[in-house]
Image: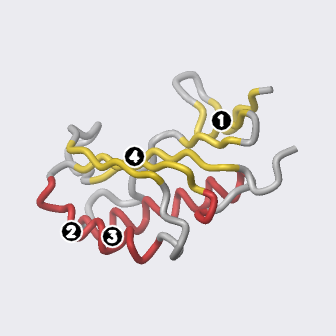
Amino acid sequence: MIERMQTKQRMSRIVKHNGTIYLCGQVCKDAEQGIKEQTATMLEKVDELLQQAGSDRNHILSATIYIKDMKYFAEMNEVWDNWVPEGHAPARACVTASMAREALLVEISVVAAEINPA
């Protein structure tokens, strides 16, 4: 069974299938901030969505990070490294990408396992 949460015409923010959770791309809460702040608030949104879906950052399987310019890579990684629980690093890719809005510096897409699948 496929469960879609917070669904609108274009996308669902969360999709669950067979104990796996897929989050739509998440961006920061305030695009006027720098890369560290954008990364931190983006990851806060991931935490919130994972909790709603029955998971947490310890159960992230895969993350794809889209970064506007690799000049931000080290600063973004500093925030990421402090956020990922030790011993629970997911498979990850990080690529340079054009953003939907000019002020956005980073976006993430996450796949996670449910903590207690039905």
Q: Read off the residue under disc 3.
A: 37
Q: How is the image coloured?
A: secondary structure
Q: Amino acid under label 4?
A: Thr
Q: Earlier in the sequence, mark 4 or mark 3?
A: 3
Front residue of 68/55: it is 55
Q: Callout 3: few (<14), some (14-19), or many (20+) C-alpha neighbours within 10 Å?
A: some
Where does residue 34 sit, x and y in percent of width and height? 23, 67
Q: Are marks 2 and 4 in contact (CB under 8 Å)?
A: no
Q: Residue furthest front?
A: 87
Closer mark to the observer between disc 3 and disc 1:
1
| Image position of 24 with respect to 30: above or below | above
Q: Amino acid under label 1?
A: Val
Question: Cα distance, mark 3 to mark 1?
Answer: 27 Å
Q: Residue furthest right?
A: 118
Closer mark to the observer between disc 4 and disc 3:
4
Q: Residue at x 30, y 53 (%)?
A: 106
Q: Which mark is residue 64?
A: 4
Q: Read off the residue under disc 1.
A: 15
- Disc 3 is placed on an element classified as helix
Q: Read off the residue under disc 2.
A: 74
Q: Are marks 1 and 2 in contact (CB under 8 Å)?
A: no
Where does residue 22 sit, x and y in percent of width and height? 59, 40
- Disc 4 is placed on an element classified as strand
Closer mark to the observer between disc 4 and disc 1:
4
Question: Cα distance, mark 2 to mark 4?
Answer: 16 Å
Q: Amino acid under label 2?
A: Ala
Q: Amino acid under label 3?
A: Glu
Question: Cα distance, mark 2 to mark 3?
Answer: 14 Å
